[in-house]
Amino acid sequence: MTQPATPLLSEPSPTRVGLNTGWAIMQSLFLPIALAMLLTACGSKQEEGFHVTPTIDTTSPTGVYIPKDIPDAHQELLKMLPKKVVEKLKNGTPQEIFLYENSLGLWIRNNWRLWGTDSRLKENLVAQGFLHPDDMSGVIMGSFIHYLRGESLGVEQAAARCKRQYSEWQNTLAEKTNSTAIQKQVVSPAK
């Protein structure tokens, strides 16, 4: 079956870089140089766009195949990405790789329904401990880079970091909520 042309994805634009706290694996790879990368990348010129050719699935809500798990996602990425993009992910500098979050990461979140409720991939990732779509696309892309390089994927470690981070956020939120409730009690006299 002929695959329809997909929207042009722009290659990463250094001017659109934003730090994304959900990138557990990406952070573990590049955190030490993130600041230097952001400072040097701002003056870079945007590269040409690229087209992805995902597997068509007419039963999918997005019309494209949604992988069932991370290894399946790696295989789909190998099929759908241009060879030059795969090579950049495999051999690129941390700056080049990190910048793909704005294009490929967004495509993954939207087309593999990581924001939705009807994605088997999302269900699989939630079961592993990834609760936010940014974390999900981050672990998919980060582990894909490890896969291309023949390295350990690091998914379990990323899941553990995410669980720890979610727990810390919940504790902080609970502390702030309790603090706010106490402040309201002090300010508002009891009736």
Image (cartoon, helix red, strand yellow):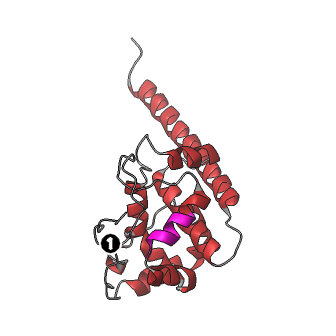
User: Would residue 112 be found to the left or right of residue 148 on screen?
Assistant: left
User: Would residue 4 be found to the left or right of residue 179 on screen?
Assistant: left
Residue ID at (44%, 24%): 185
User: Would residue 188 be found to the left or right of residue 156 on screen?
Assistant: left
83 vs 181, nearest the viewer: 83
Total number of numbered labels?
A: 1
Q: Is residue 142 magenta?
A: no
Q: Position of residue 158 (x, y in %)?
A: 64, 59
Question: Element type at marker 1?
Answer: loop
SS majority, magenta? helix
Q: Position of residue 134 (x, y in %)?
A: 47, 57
Residue 37 visible to an observer of this rendering: no
- Which quadrant holds the C terminus? top left
Residue 122 lies, with reference to residue 95, above or below; the image says above
User: Would residue 119 be found to the left or right of residue 74 on screen?
Assistant: left
- Pointer 1 residue: 9
> Hey, what amino acid is under mark 1?
Leu
Residue 70 visible to an observer of this rendering: yes
Q: Is residue 79 magenta?
A: yes
Residue ID at (52%, 71%): 78
Q: Position of residue 38 (x, y in %)?
A: 43, 79
Q: Position of residue 39 (x, y in %)?
A: 42, 83
* First to last magenta residue range: 74-81
